[in-house]
Image (cartoon, helix red, strand yellow):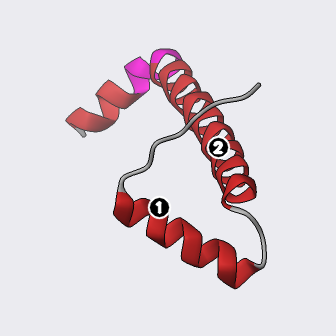
Amino acid sequence: MAMTVRLPPPIDSALEELARQRHTSKHALLIEAADRFTRQESRTERVLVSVDEITTEYSELLTRLEDA
């Protein structure tokens, strides 16, 4: 899908420099960044769900440990 991205000048300059250093395009860098971001957010969500499940499952034990 086509998309227009308007970046603030400092970010655009940094992206341009990184693209030059890596011998790639800004487009490729933005795809890589979006991919990393979405995978990281997915992992974060899975961790938060796991923490909620553990907290629920062990709530009584955690309360007893708090009081110890």
Q: Which mark is residue 21?
A: none
Residue at the extreme left of the image, as rendered: 67
**Residue position marked by numbered label 1 in the rendering:** 12
Residue 51 painted magenta:
no
Left or right of 52 in this view: 68: left
In this rendering, the answer to whether 8 lies above or below 41 is below
Q: Secondary structure at mark 1?
A: helix
| Callout 2 crowding tier (Cα within 10 Å): few <14, some 14–19, many ≥20 | few
Q: Position of residue 49 (x, y in %)?
A: 56, 23
Amino acid marked by disc 2? Ala
| Callout 1 crowding tier (Cα within 10 Å): few <14, some 14–19, many ≥20 | few
Q: Secondary structure at mark 2?
A: helix
Q: Residue visible at 39% across and 18% down?
A: 60
**Residue position marked by numbered label 2 in the rendering:** 34
Residue 57 painted magenta:
yes
Amino acid marked by disc 1? Asp
What predominant SS class does the magenta segment belong to? helix
Q: Residue visible at 73% across and 64% down?
A: 25
Q: Nearer the viewer, residue 9 or 44?
A: 9
Q: Nearer the viewer, residue 4 or 38?
A: 4
Question: Which region is colored magenta?
Answer: 56-61
The quarter in which the N terminus is drawn is top right
* Label located before the other in sequence (2 or 1): 1
Q: Position of residue 7 (x, y in %)?
A: 43, 49
Query: Residue 37: which quarter of the image?
Result: top right
Q: Residue visible at 66% across and 60% down?
A: 26
Q: Residue visible at 21% across and 34% down?
A: 67
Q: Nearer the viewer, residue 54 or 6?
A: 6
Q: Position of residue 51 (x, y in %)?
A: 51, 29
In this rendering, the answer to whether 9 lies above or below 19 is above
Q: Nearer the viewer, residue 33 or 54?
A: 33
The quarter in which the C terminus is drawn is top left
